[in-house]
């Protein structure tokens, strides 16, 4: 049962991913992304990772995709024509590398099959409480470091978003 | 539930730098009419410099002490402390370069220095991480900070292009890294390097995970074939940032790479061959590409790729000799490379919309105009080429020695041949400086400021003396490496 | 009569004095003071180096040894010493130092200070090469000598100076690249970089072969042995006179010295195996150098090609692998340094006056500048090997050694001597005799007192060596004997009678 559900969701997620890359209309891309995010959220639930699933819906499907859509609407849906398939050699190489990579991942996973049928953790391992406990005890260090990362991101945002001000005496040149 | 016990002494230097970063960030709001000015920028830089010096003192104070850790995620061992010293040295030199360079093109001084210090913190944490998630977050801290610093010259197209390129490729490499970490977790059920070392199956999953981690490191180290971003980013970024990151990022990534490889769970024979091939490719490609550059910054970018290749020889050689050689080389590289970039920053034509860059021709006739500067630059370049008795030669000597002692004779030969190739493009600059006359293409920003002068002087003294008085120093690095390899 | 100098680290003093002088130059502005300091340093260095002779004992061992552990983790030490093989090369170096400074007194127009600094540190590098007994220390000095010469050629050289300088640097650096790897390989095998310890550790023949080839490549380029000589004509011709003198006088000897000091005693089996091949190359070099010198129109390139021939001759002595051959090689190295140094100086002197070195521009100089002409004749005679002068002793000893090793070598080598007489005398005839028909030559000034003083010490030595060769051979012979016996004991097949 879980397997069938997983396969179904995985196909949807894949379709969503392809939709993001292949569709020419940015709005369609963003919506495909939403589809992808949502189906992955459900996969998280299947794996008993409730907290992740919720975060996935709220942050990614909710905030980020909406942000994307806002930006697309603000700029205007039609970004203009772009060159397509002009470099066949590179795309062949890229597809080849991607295929090799896929084979590598599949092969390495197949090697360790059959894995234990149940997910690694207990059923409530993904609950808000369990995740919170883990973050504040065992994974306190990376959690605290993440706050530094956010600070860097914030500072970076400020720097990039602020109007560029060269020094006054140079502006006239 | 019991809260974890945290031994803050493990991260004293990092805490000092973080505190300094916060102070620098808030310095923006001090003073009634806080208008940015060079004087103000100098004050902020001074605070940042003090923080770096304090952190370095803290790191030095810890040298020789037994290794302590926080929850097995961050470790304070001598390897980590030496890494901190390299990064802090590079950061201090880069900061001195920015001293007068920064106010020329921007008003956002406290933002610059805060981001700069946070990048430093990221590097220091990265070299001390013994757990993959911590490692990843540290990597991201330094990466994101550097993406922004690369594009700091907002008026320039080239800077924007460089930042965007760096960001996209960097994000891509982070994805590889995290994928590799996930595979290793899948293999062993843990993200701690100790557990991975103990539990890794050694099968295909371990290999794939390790390979992906290696790709992630490869991007940060600018290892061929993951080097494409390097020339554009090094050229587009403000020169002080380029100087700092060319050394700091490498240092952090190399030490982290050593930690990961030690826990690889894969035999030495497997990964050392891969690394030997990568080293060969990186050295050769970097040097050959550097031959054809007409921009000094791009030339030094390709040269830094080649130097990553030399250091990979040390990684290939393994944990003891190789590690101490790489550590030594990082110090030597910090002095000579930042020194070279310092001179390059003086040869740059300022431009607000065009690319701000130093062409090789700008160095024409430098000896006639500023003899001392030309001599100093020649010494940095000859050291990069590995000519004795400069620091770069001793660095290469120890690297190649490590290679030969572990049986990688052909790798040492490839390295020596590459040194000769590289001598050609370094010599080209000395030819222009000493053996041609100045013409309209030559350029020199004047006057030489005290801060840049100090940076050049420090780099110069290091390049001249590090190798000659290396004896006891190398012994200490060797002990650090031994302690690490035995742990 | 001899003072006891063993308490003083004499070699270190000789080695580092020039650097001290060079550092002093940074604090001086006046050109005349710069020249004086440079000359005084060089003279002092020479006087100090004479101390070696005062306390010399005629044994084959290393003397004035200084040893200090330098880089403990790798067991690299600051290990110096001289024996009969290196003694006169060191003295030659310190003698040429003041001579080139004095020669350059007036004709360095720009950056005199930098020029003098380079000459001084160059001297330190060369003395270091001749006295190091630790392979890494040796390699450091060996490579270091490239830097000053590169800048001397590139900054103060002739028309194609940049090309010549870069070629010189890359060629020599490429040659010694493999040498470093092999030094590390020896360390891996034996755990030591020390020359004395390495001698006592027998090496596997395969290792010997590779090690010999790598060392020989580096040294053969320096000598230069045919066909590795192509950098030499460029570098010699384009270098400023002082540079040419140092290049021909002592830099090339570093290659010969390398063979004697390292290849022979450390890799005896490989040496025996490759000796005939090297002899072949040396003979090819003798004939090639002579033939090319014959058709040169520029006096300086004529002297440059003659160097290839002369050094081929010295190499022939080296690979004879007997007492006479080796001793002759050492002595002839010194002779060549003196006589070719003097030749370059004299070519430089005429160039300073006429700004050309083409043979066709000259003729009949006897009538206009007799002192110059007389001295040139003496110098050429020394170079040609006239009995009574130094060249004869060296060439004769080498020929005896070569004859013992292989008669054909000696015969071909003699042909080379005849060629040398031919092209040098032809050049002298063209310059000094005939009508004084070029108006530019009719206004030539004869040598100044300074220029004569530059040449006098060299010419005195021609006679000293030529008339009393045993003063020198007595000191060279024991070292050569020790070397040969050590080789014989270490080699798998005994080759000494």
Image: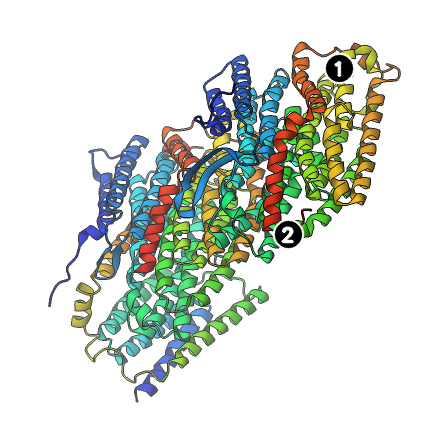
Q: Nearer the viewer, mark 2 or mark 1?
A: 2
Q: Assess disc 1: are there few (<14), some (14-19) or many (≥20) residues with their C-alpha within 10 Å of its C-alpha.
A: many
Cα separation, mark 2 vs mark 1, equals 48 Å
Outermost right residue: C435
Q: Residue at x 75, y 42 (%)?
A: C404
Outermost bottom residue: A1
> Which residue lies under the disc numbered 1?
C372
Place of residue C156 in the rendered image (x, y in percent of width and height, measured from the top left): 63, 26
- Tell which of B296 and C171 is nearer to you: C171
Answer yes or no: is residue B435 visible.
no
Q: Which mark is residue C270?
A: 2
Determine whether, in the image, residue C382 is placed left or right of residue B485: right
Badge 1 marks a residue whose secondary structure is helix
Choose the circle earlier in sequence order: 2 or 1: 2
Q: Residue at x 30, y 83 (%)?
A: A116
Place of residue C123 in the rendered image (x, y in percent of width and height, measured from the top left): 56, 28
- Tell which of A169 and B68 is nearer to you: B68
Determine whether, in the image, residue C68 is placed left or right of residue C2: left
Place of residue C144 in the rendered image (x, y in percent of width and height, measured from the top left): 54, 36
Badge 2 marks a residue whose secondary structure is helix
Outermost front residue: C497
Q: Chain of mark 1?
A: C
Q: Residue at x 36, y 74 (%)?
A: A36
Q: Which mark is residue B400?
A: none
- Tell which of B419 and A125 is nearer to you: B419
Q: Quadrant of residue C106?
A: top right
């Amino acid at each position: 049962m879980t397997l069938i559900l997983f396969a179904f969701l995985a196909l949807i997620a894949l379709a969503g991913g392809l939709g993001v890359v292949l569709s020419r209309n940015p709005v369609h891309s963003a919506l495909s992304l939403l589809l992808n995010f949502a189906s992955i959220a459900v996969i998280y639930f299947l794996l008993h990772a409730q907290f992740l699933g919720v975060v996935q819906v709220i942050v990614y499907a909710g905030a980020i995709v909406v942000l994307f859509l806002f930006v697309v609407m603000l700029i205007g849906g039609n970004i203009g024509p772009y060159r397509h398939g002009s470099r066949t050699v590179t795309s062949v190489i890229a597809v080849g590398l991607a295929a090799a990579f896929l084979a590598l991942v599949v092969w390495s996973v197949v090697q360790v099959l059959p894995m234990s049928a149940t997910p690694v953790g207990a059923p409530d391992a993904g609950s808000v409480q369990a995740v919170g406990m883990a973050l504040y005890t065992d994974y306190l260090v990376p959690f605290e470091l993440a706050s530094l990362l956010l600070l860097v991101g914030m500072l970076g945002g400020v720097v990039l978003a602020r109007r560029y001000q060269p020094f006054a005496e140079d502006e006239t040149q | 539930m019991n809260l974890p016990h945290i031994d803050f002494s493990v991260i004293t230097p990092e805490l000092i730098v973080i505190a300094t970063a916060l102070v620098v960030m808030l310095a923006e709001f001090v003073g009634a009419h806080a208008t940015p000015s060079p004087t103000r920028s100098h004050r902020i830089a001074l605070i940042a410099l003090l923080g770096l010096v304090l952190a370095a003192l803290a790191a030095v104070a810890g040298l020789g002490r037994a290794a302590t850790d926080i929850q097995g995620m961050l470790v304070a061992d001598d390897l980590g402390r030496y890494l901190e010293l390299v990064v802090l040295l590079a950061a201090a030199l880069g900061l001195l370069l920015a001293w007068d360079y920064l106010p020329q093109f921007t008003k956002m001084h406290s933002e610059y220095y805060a981001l700069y210090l946070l990048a430093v913190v990221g590097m220091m944490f990265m070299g001390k991480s013994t757990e993959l998630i911590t490692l990843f977050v540290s990597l991201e801290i330094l990466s994101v900070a550097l993406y922004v610093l690369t594009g700091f010259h907002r008026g320039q197209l080239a800077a924007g292009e460089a930042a965007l390129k760096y960001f996209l490729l960097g994000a891509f490499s982070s994805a590889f890294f995290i994928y590799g970490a996930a595979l290793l977790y899948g293999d062993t059920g843990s993200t701690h390097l100790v557990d991975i070392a103990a539990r890794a199956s050694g099968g295909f999953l371990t290999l794939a995970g390790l390979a992906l981690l290696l790709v992630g490191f490869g991007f940060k180290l600018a290892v061929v074939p993951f080097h494409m971003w390097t020339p554009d980013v090094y050229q587009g970024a403000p020169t002080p940032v380029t100087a700092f990151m060319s050394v700091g990022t490498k240092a952090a990534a190399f030490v982290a790479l050593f930690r990961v490889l030690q826990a690889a769970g894969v035999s030495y024979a497997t990964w050392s061959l891969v690394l030997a091939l990568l080293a060969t490719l990186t050295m050769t490609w970097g040097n050959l590409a550097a031959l054809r550059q007409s921009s000094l910054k791009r030339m030094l970018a390709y040269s830094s790729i080649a130097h990553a290749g030399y250091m990979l020889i040390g990684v290939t050689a393994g944990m003891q000799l190789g590690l101490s050689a790489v550590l030594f080389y990082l110090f030597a590289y910090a002095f000579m490379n930042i020194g070279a970039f310092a001179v390059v920053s003086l040869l740059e034509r300022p431009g607000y919309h065009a690319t701000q860059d130093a062409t090789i021709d700008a160095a024409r006739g430098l000896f006639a105009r500023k003899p001392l500067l030309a001599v100093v630059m020649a010494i940095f370049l000859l050291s990069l080429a590995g000519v004795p008795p400069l620091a770069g030669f001793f660095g290469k000597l120890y690297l190649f020695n490590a290679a030969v002692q572990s049986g990688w004779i052909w790798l040492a030969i490839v390295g020596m041949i590459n040194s000769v190739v590289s001598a050609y493009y370094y010599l080209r600059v000395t030819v222009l400086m000493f053996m041609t006359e100045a013409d309209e293409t030559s350029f020199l920003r004047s006057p030489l400021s005290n801060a840049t002068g100090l940076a050049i002087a420090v780099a110069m003294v290091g390049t001249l003396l590090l190798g000659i008085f290396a004896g006891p120093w190398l012994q200490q690095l060797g002990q650090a490496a031994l302690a690490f390899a035995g742990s | 009569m001899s003072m006891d100098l063993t308490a003083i680290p004499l070699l270190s003093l000789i080695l580092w004095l020039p650097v001290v002088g060079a550092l002093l130059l940074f604090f001086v502005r006046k050109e005349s003071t710069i020249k004086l300091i440079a000359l005084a340093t060089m003279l002092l260095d020479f006087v100090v180096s004479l101390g070696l002779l005062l306390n010399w004992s005629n044994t084959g061992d290393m003397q004035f040894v200084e040893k200090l552990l330098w880089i403990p983790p790798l067991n690299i030490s600051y290990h110096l010493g001289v024996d009969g093989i290196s003694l006169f090369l060191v003295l030659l170096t310190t003698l040429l130092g003041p001579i080139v400074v004095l020669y350059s007194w007036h004709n360095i127009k720009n950056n005199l200070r930098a020029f003098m600094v380079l000459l001084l540190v160059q001297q330190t590098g060369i003395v270091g090469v001749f006295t190091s007994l630790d392979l890494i220390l040796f390699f450091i000095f060996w490579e270091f000598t490239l830097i000053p010469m590169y800048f001397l050629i590139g900054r103060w050289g002739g028309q194609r100076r940049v090309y010549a300088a870069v070629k010189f640097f890359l060629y020599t650096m490429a040659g010694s690249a493999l040498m470093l790897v092999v030094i590390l390989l020896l360390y891996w095998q034996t755990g030591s970089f020390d020359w004395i310890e390495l001698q006592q550790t027998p090496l596997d023949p395969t290792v010997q072969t590779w090690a010999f080839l790598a060392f020989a490549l580096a040294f053969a380029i320096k000598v230069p042995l045919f066909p590795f000589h192509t950098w030499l004509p460029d570098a010699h011709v384009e270098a400023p006179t002082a540079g040419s003198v140092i290049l021909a006088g002592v830099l090339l000897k570093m290659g010969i010295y390398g063979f004697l000091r390292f290849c022979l005693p450390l890799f005896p089996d490989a040496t025996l195996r490759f000796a005939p091949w090297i002899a072949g190359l040396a003979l090819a070099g003798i004939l090639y150098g002579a033939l090319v010198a014959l058709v040169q129109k520029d006096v300086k390139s004529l002297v440059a090609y003659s160097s290839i021939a002369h050094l081929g001759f010295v190499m022939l002595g080296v690979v004879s692998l007997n007492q006479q051959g080796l001793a002759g090689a050492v002595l002839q190295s010194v002779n060549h340094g003196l006589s070719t140094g003097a030749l370059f100086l004299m070519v430089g002197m005429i160039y300073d006056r006429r700004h050309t070195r083409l043979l066709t521009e000259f003729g009949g100089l006897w009538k206009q500048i007799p002192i110059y002409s007389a001295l040139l004749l003496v110098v050429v005679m020394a170079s040609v090997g006239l009995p009574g002068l130094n060249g004869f002793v060296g060439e004769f000893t080498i020929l005896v050694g070569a004859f013992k090793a292989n008669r054909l070598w000696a015969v071909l080598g003699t042909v080379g001597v005849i060629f040398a007489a031919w092209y040098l005398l032809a050049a002298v005839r063209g310059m000094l005799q005939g009508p004084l028909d070029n108006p530019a030559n009719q206004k030539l000034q004869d040598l100044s007192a300074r220029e004569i003083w530059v040449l006098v010490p060299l010419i005195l030595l021609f006679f000293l060596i030529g008339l009393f060769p045993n003063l020198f051979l007595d000191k060279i012979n024991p070292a050569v004997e020790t070397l040969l016996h050590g080789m014989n004991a270490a080699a798998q097949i005994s080759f000494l009678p």
